[in-house]
Image (spheres, helix red, strand yellow):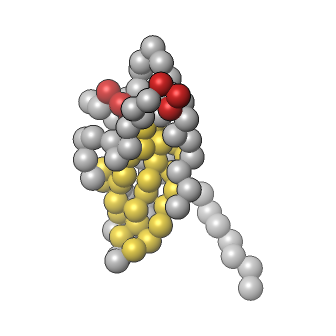
């Protein structure tokens, strides 16, 4: 059986959020999983800071196309100096 995939015309499903300092520059490289009727999207994000920091955010969707962030705060924030730029590509 062959599976044919088609790119959704309304990509990207999540864009940077200018109102959130930690994700106003970029959102990218999500990991997605389906649980209890919702698609969970764990994504990496960055803001405009002197030290390039990567944060992780979480968004949910009922249909896998339209996502809402669960919070204005990241679900993971780098806290130590060696973590700058290190929270890459969430794998779930």
Give left or right: position of 19 versus 13. Answer: left
The residue at 30%/50% (across/down) is: 69
Query: Residue 4 falls in which quadrant of the image?
Result: bottom right
Say which of 60 and 86 sits in front: 86
Decide which of 67, 31 is in the foreground and name it: 31
* Quadrant in which the N terminus is drawn: bottom right
Residue furthest toward the top?
50
Which residue is located at x 44 percent, y 53 percent? 42
In percent of the image, x 42 and y 18: which residue is there? 49
Looking at the image, the residue that sits furthest to the right is 1
Percent position of residue 92, x then y: 52, 61
Where residue 27 appears, as percent x and y from the top left, is 46, 39
Q: Is residue 48 above or below residue 78?
A: above
Check the image and report above or below for 30 versus 50. Answer: below
Q: What is the x, y in percent for residue 47? A: 41, 26
Q: Where's residue 46, x and y in %?
A: 44, 31
Does residue 15 show up? no
Q: Quadrant of residue 79?
A: top left
Residue 4 seen anywhere in this rendered image of the structure: yes
Q: Is residue 29 left or right of residue 59?
A: right
Residue depicted at 35% across the width and 63% down the height? 61
Compared with 68, 84 (above or below) is above
Q: Nearer the viewer, residue 83 or 88?
A: 83
Q: Is residue 50 above or below residue 66?
A: above
């Amino acid at each position: 059986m062959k599976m044919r995939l088609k790119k959704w015309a309304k990509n990207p499903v999540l864009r940077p959020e200018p109102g959130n300092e930690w994700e106003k520059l970029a959102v990218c490289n999500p990991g997605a999983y389906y649980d209890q009727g919702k698609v969970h999207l764990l994504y990496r994000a960055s803001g405009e800071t002197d030290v390039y920091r990567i944060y992780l955010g979480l968004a949910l969707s009922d249909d896998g196309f339209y996502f809402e962030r669960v919070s204005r705060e990241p679900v993971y924030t780098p806290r130590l100096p060696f973590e700058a730029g290190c929270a890459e590509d969430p794998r779930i």
